[in-house]
Amino acid sequence: MEVLIHDSAEEATVVAAAAIARLLADKPDAVLGLATGNTMLALYRQLVRLHRQEGLDFSRVTTFNLDEYVGLDPQHPDSYHRFMREHLFDLVNIDLRATHIPDGQAQDMSQACADYERAIERAGGIDLQLLGIGRNGHIGFNEPSSSLASRTRVTPLAAQTLKDNRCHFHQEPMPSSAITMGIGTIMQARRCLLLAFGEAKAEAVAQAAEGPVTAMVPASALQFHPACQFLLDHPAASKLHNQAFYASQRAES
Ligand code: F6R
């Protein structure tokens, strides 16, 4: 795992967008794993800018999103389907048929989960997975105590997640469960970029990067990932013990 501490969230976001642009230059038909949430907003704005101003081409890209709330129609204003249309898909030249988001309304949820895993496999696996992190250390909606080998499945949302995400909901009640890629699914991505900004994420980041690997901090599984970078701003990095080492690592690269 590599920890990169940036002067600002903006700088980290530009680095993440540049990594995606490089990947698409090398492999125009790359498979991207996408996340939603506040952390991703500036990154998607940056990708849209690169598309409009520098011709970043999404026409051959395939995407798989991490998660969706159970019970929400894709048109629901608070669904992750809508989030992705509004913040990325409708603003770049992506083929919507090549975008995948778990179906929160599937009749047969376990079949939908198995199909999602198979679709990722058929696409050749995920080249680059974007991740945010919850204040409780979740990635996707893999909440504390999720198996580190878990696959796409339906899971209840933790109390902390319900509390943190309730403010994004225009309509009550907020769903209490979600369909999410598993930690095992995420770990198979060839590369992971986890973005975290702001002091509210500092404890989760410190536990994920420097604490023991434990199902109680799902993001700590990333310590076993062979190509994972944490892109942080200073407040999100503020509880890391090893900051001087990460800075020296960065100076040498
Ligand atoms: C969203 C997702 C979540 C978020 C995390 C951070 O698709 O998978 O794990 O990345 O909850 O959310 P924000 O960025 O809103 O703090």
Image (tube, helix red, strand yellow):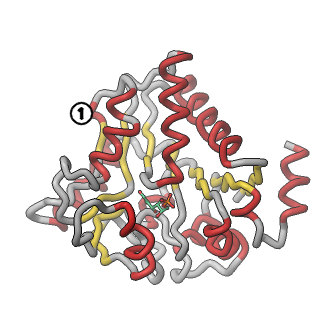
Assess disc 1: are there few (<14), some (14-19) or many (≥20) residues with their C-alpha within 10 Å of its C-alpha: few
Query: Nearest the camera: 209 or 235?
Result: 235
Residue at 71% in and 41% down: 11
Q: How many marks?
A: 1
For disc 1, does the CB lie below 8 Å from ligand 1? no
Q: Is residue 40 above or below residue 154?
A: above
Q: Quadrant of residue 22?
A: top right
Residue at 36% in and 66% down: 151
Question: Could you say where residue 64 lies in the image, as x and y percent from the top left?
Answer: 36, 46
Q: Is residue 171 above or below residue 252?
A: below
Q: Is residue 167 above or below residue 78?
A: below
Question: Could you say where residue 112 lies in the image, as x and y percent from the top left?
Answer: 19, 59
Residue position marked by numbered label 1 in the rendering: 97
Left or right, residue 207 beside residue 103: right
Left or right, residue 230 beside residue 69: right
Residue at 57% in and 81% down: 214
Question: Could you say where residue 193 lies in the image, as x and y percent from the top left?
Answer: 59, 50
Q: Residue furthest left?
A: 107
Q: Quadrant of residue 92?
A: top left
Query: Nearest the camera: 232 or 116?
Result: 232
Q: Is residue 91 above or below residue 132?
A: above
Residue at 90% in and 45% down: 252
Left or right, residue 105 beside residue 96: left
Q: Quadrant of residue 95?
A: top left
Q: Secondary structure at mark 1?
A: helix
Quadrant occupied by the N terminus: bottom right
Quadrant occupied by the C terminus: top right
Mark 1: amino acid? Arg
Question: Could you say where residue 142 lies in the image, as x and y percent from the top left?
Answer: 42, 71
